[in-house]
Image: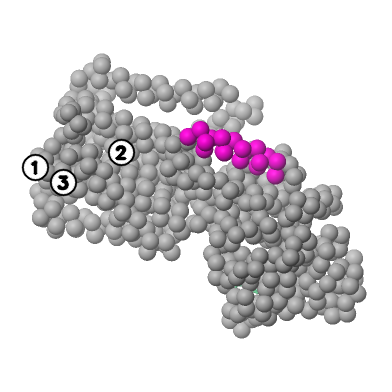
Amino acid sequence: MSRRLVGTIAPVLAVMVVLALPLVTTDRYLFKVLTFVGLNLIVVAGLALLFGYAGQISLGHAAFFGIGAYTVGYLTADGAVPWLIATLAATVLAALVGFTLALPMLRLKGHYLGMATLGFSEIMTVLFVEARGITGGNDGLRGIPYPVLGPFKIATPGGVYLLVWITAIIVLVLAGNLVRTRPGRALRALHGAELGAQACGIDTGRLRVQVFALSAGLAGLAGALYASSVGYVSPTTFSLEFSVLLVAMIVLGGTGSIAGPVAACVGLTLLPYVDALIPGLPREAVSFLQDWEADIAGIVMILVLLFAPGGVAGLIRSMTRAGDSR
Amino acid sequence: MTVLATRGLSRRFGGLVAVDDVSFDVHAGMIKALIGPNGAGKSTLFNLLTGFDRPDAGDISFLGASILGWAPHRVVRAGIARTFQNTQLFDEMTVAENVLVGMHTCLRAGFAEGSLRLPATKASERAAVEQACRLLRLVGADRFADSPGADVPHGVRRLVEIARALASNPKLLLLDEPAAGLNNAETHALATCLRRIQADGTTILIVEHDMGLVMEISDEIIVLDRGRKIAEGPPLLIQKDAAVIEAYLGEVIADA
Ligand SMILES: Nc1ncnc2c1ncn2[C@@H]1O[C@H](COP(=O)(O)OP(=O)(O)OP(=O)(O)O)[C@@H](O)[C@H]1O
Ligand SMILES: [Mg+2]
């Protein structure tokens, strides 16, 4: 009972703190960093469904993020298309590309799925540079306008922060609902025993395509918000390194959980910004963390896989279970 | 009324003919047993019937319509549910959740409804949880409802699979060796449970090595040997059939 209470109160408190933050500070840098956390949370929500629940790995989600970002950058330049429509278009386009990619990948599993999505990611990286007419090549796109919602232009770091976090919270709530109902159970079943899932009447092929397209769409949405938040896109942002970092967030957070990856996402996204967030850290420690961020994420991921395969969520689960039996 | 009919069903693996020109009918409301020595082709036949494998020849019709070449999920939706000889439980999910997955075809909520969790979705989820508990009580596995699938003893895993298969509300239930791993008392309870399922109007086709159970519950028996149907009929006739005794029952009776 108390556990359930904590389970409902903790997220509500977190949401209140997130939404109240602009009332107590106007620190531009803080908002910028937290905006990145919120954007990553949107991607992580989709990847948790795809990888954490359905067990389908993707090393290509940075590319879907990129598709969303370039779509918004291209469409909203010169105010050609309203922000909201461009953002929806970016989301749908990323989902469609995900859908198209998922169809031929249906026969692939495990490492092969990883390799296929990796190949896709590499192709997109080349495309982002070479399709100069749309992407601006190596220079990327600049001067992407801020989000405009009806009469409101969201042009302050605090406003952008709120927009991104409200979106992230909505996405996380929806994902949290999803995993507790029929489609969420089907995803877990797919991961657990594919034959068993089919014997329960689940169209496993269709479900895999659906969840891949959904998670690609969410990555596209995050990318779209990213482009209009920071005002520019350049091809280096959507690298394999980013894809791996996203997967690390799921591994570290734990499979079969939303809350675990959320915690891991916050931690891993803030890692390079520790100096600004925790004043007084020795300079060597800070530069060490920043230089070795990707390596630290990799080592943490290996340690988790070796010693705590359930991730953060698994540790909490085993702790509460031990508590229950006492 | 004929629920299931196969005609000339065959399946070859390389040079081995695992199922060889098998034809039989299953009539509504009966418990029909499929017996035969190890490697006779019983599980292969189940895979053909449920779309997990495709026959090289022959036809399968369910309630008068051919289901040949249908994918497993379509077969389930049509009304045939099965269990596996090597259980296929979802180990990471609780036993109750396993049964809830079995209700997939009866529940409606897709991605949109599930993520919004509207009152109607919540209500049907609550009803589903109650139904799952009922089914677990029926098979006698309710005390494991909250255990993860991985923690459940071997015999009980088969019972959970029965509950999960029943959850799709099938017209025909295919059970592959449900009594394997059960002791005498548990086998007896299983017999009672199967009779109750039968009484609720579900037709059953059961593969089973426990001859006591087979003779006790089945209305009709088919005997397979090396892929061929060598006999079919009521238990009393099968027990006396010379070919059956030669191929199979002789050793069982001699063993007993
Ligand atoms: N996928 C496969 N590939 C090749 N051979 C197979 C395959 N599946 C089954 N067989 C062979 O087909 C024959 C029938 O196997 P099946 O599993 O259907 O027998 P069974 O009657 O269920 O036996 P048991 O009582 O041991 O469960 C066996 O000789 C088996 O080795
Ligand atoms: Mg078998």
Report in which chain the residue with disc 3 lies. A
Report in which chain the residue with disc 2 lies. A
Residue A242 placement, left or right of B42: left
Report whether the residue tagged 3 is closer than 8 Å to ligand 1: no
SS assignment at label 3: helix
Amino acid marked by disc 1: Asp
Amino acid marked by disc 3: Leu
Please state the extent of the stretch shown in magenta in the rendering. Answer: B118-135
Residue A89 placement, left or right of B146: left
Distance of label 2 from label 3 (alpha carbons): 23 Å
- Residues tagged by mark 3 and mark 1 found on one chain of the structure: yes
Disc 3 crowd, CA 10 A, few/some/many (<14, 14-19, 20+): many
Distance of label 2 from label 1 (alpha carbons): 27 Å
Residue A104 placement, left or right of A149: right
The answer to whether marks 3 and 1 mark residues whose Cβ atoms lie closer than 8 Å is: no
> Residue at point 33% right, 59% down?
A100
Q: Identify the mark at residue A40; answer none if there is no mark.
A: 2
SS assignment at label 1: helix
- Mark in front: 2 vs 3: 3
Residue underneath mark 1: A78
Where is residue B252, by image quadrant? bottom right
Where is residue A79, by image quadrant? top left
**Colour mode of the rendering:** one colour
Q: Quadrant of the N terminus of chain A?
A: top right
> Residue at point 60% right, 59% down?
B78
